[in-house]
Amino acid sequence: MKTALVLGASGGVGGETARALIAHGWTVRGLTRTPRSGDGIEWIAGDAMDRDDVLRAAQGVQAIVHAVNPPGYRNWAKLVIPMIDNSIAAAQANNARLALPGTIYNYDPAATPLASPDSPQYPSTRKGAIRRDMEARIEASGVRALILRAGDFFGPRPGNSWLSQGMVTPGRPVTSILLPGKRGTGHTWAYLPDVGETFARLLDREADLPRFARHHFAGHWDADGMGLAEAIQRTTGRPAKLRRMPWRLLPLIAPFNPTMREMIEMQAYWRHPVALDNASLVAVLGKEPHTPLDEAMRATLLALKVS
């Protein structure tokens, strides 16, 4: 039996990775601060910020998926590094492979229109610098590791998602769509169930992975910045008003809204295209798991109760 501990199993990428691992025959444990049950997960009470809790939950596992993040991008600088250090310690204690969902934020969007796994990392944001440092700490620790970088997430388990937290409003009909980017600027999106399936397929190939494996997930490339908005309208069957993100006004709101302060940093990734080269991933798996965009959008809007 293969056992994995998924930190963040109640969230977006963590939840979908947990589901995929279970479908692949893994036993999955989840660490939770709130008592819960179900989803085929063995839930263990604890906090990812508490090293003893993480070590206890990880006893005897072969893989640890570190998919936990502070909600709403809050307190990143204070919380993210201690959490990854706890996961590193648990991986070392169990000789387990540590899997991390990565992002495009490691790269300078103005200088990296196409990023490969070994492209230079010169992040232009504070969040990107923390992401780069997380990966560096994992590599320096010497643990067996798997990093899978992907674009902005969307899916039935949205978590901190631009789609569910800005473009549409969960639980309400779509009469308008808020566009973070501008027409003509490409953007990369990652459908969460496809990302989870990719993690499961890679972790199934433990014997074939190098000690430090790093790949890119290409996902859905929105070449002109309108692809997701058009998919939403095709799915709902009616046109919607397209509104632009009022980036110039956000600094007025930021002093009163921690999430807004973090979002402002991300503007450059909507002004410049950053695509991900998945050649190394395809070389390992043969092909990247890929759900057609309209099918993915139907499942996403259904889960969000959006019509």
Image (cartoon, rainbow, N blue to C red):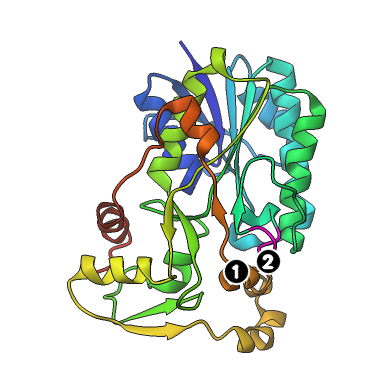
Q: Is residue 36 visible?
A: no
Say which residue label 1 marks: 272
| Location of the N terminus (image quadrant) | top left
The image shows residue 301, relative to residue 102, as above or below, that is below
Question: Which quarter of the picture shows residue 37?
Answer: top left
Return the residue found at the far left.
Answer: 237
Q: Sequence-wise, which precedes: disc 1 or disc 2?
A: 2
Q: Is residue 58 left or right of residue 196?
A: right
Return the residue found at the far right.
Answer: 140
Secondary element type, mark 2? loop
Residue 249 position in % (x across, y down):
62, 89
Q: Which residues are magenta?
A: 108-112
For the point 49% across and 25% down, the residue is: 284
Residue 173 position in % (x across, y down):
26, 75
- Three-letter residue code for mark 2: Ala
Q: Nearer the viewer, residue 44 or 125?
A: 125
The image shows residue 179, relative to residue 33, as above or below, that is below
Question: Contact, CB < 8 Å: mark 1 with mark 2?
Answer: yes
Q: Is residue 283 left or right of residue 254?
A: left
- Three-letter residue code for mark 1: His
